Image (cartoon, rainbow, N blue to C red):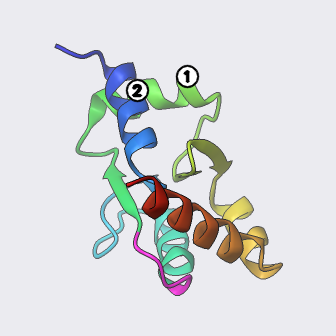
Amino acid sequence: MSTVLEKIKKQINDNPVILYMKGSPTLPNCGFSAKAVRILSSCGERFAYIDVLSNADIRAELPKFANWPTFPQLWINGKLIGGCDIIIEMYRCGELQSLIKASIEKHNLQK
């Protein structure tokens, strides 16, 4: 049986863009998660998500692993990007869109 940390690492490695959030993209359970979903959706690429409210083990362990205490957490290409404020700022300057696009393209080439 895999540990929670192994499960987290696998989720991050298997998905070029993954958002750890409260709730789901269709029903976010906090304003910060809702903002993150709106921005990611407007980038036009698919992204994976994990509802940390339904996964107490991940909710407890991910902040320690990431050294980032809050949710949402956006991971792109295996690297922590940050939370809502960072996502907003990167989107405003156009950096988020290009990073997501490059990550999706890299992932598709590796298939």
At 41% from the left edge and 66% from the top edge, which residue is drawn?
A: 47
**Residue 60 appears left or right of 72:** left
Task: Determine the residue positioned at 47% across, 30% down.
Answer: 62
- Tell me where the magenta segment starts and ends, as one range: 42-46
Residue at the right extreme? 93
Near-viewer residue (7 or 88): 7
Residue position for label 1: 64
Which quarter of the picture shows residue 97?
A: bottom right
Q: Position of residue 98 (x, y in %)?
A: 70, 74
Question: Callout 2: helix, strand or loop?
Answer: helix
Q: Amino acid type of disc 2?
A: Ala
Q: Main secondary structure of the magenta part?
A: loop
Q: Quadrant of the C terminus?
A: bottom left
Q: Are marks 1 and 2 in contact (CB under 8 Å)?
A: yes
Q: Where is 45 relative to 61, above or below?
A: below
Q: Quadrant of residue 88?
A: bottom right
Q: What's the residue type where badge 1 is placed?
A: Lys
Indicate the secondary structure of the residue bearing disc 1.
helix
Q: Which residue is mark 2?
A: 60
* Side (left or right) of 43 relative to 47: right
Q: In this picture, is 7 found above or below 109? A: above
Which labelled disc corresponds to residue 56?
Answer: none
At 48% from the left edge and 60% from the top edge, which residue is drawn?
Answer: 109
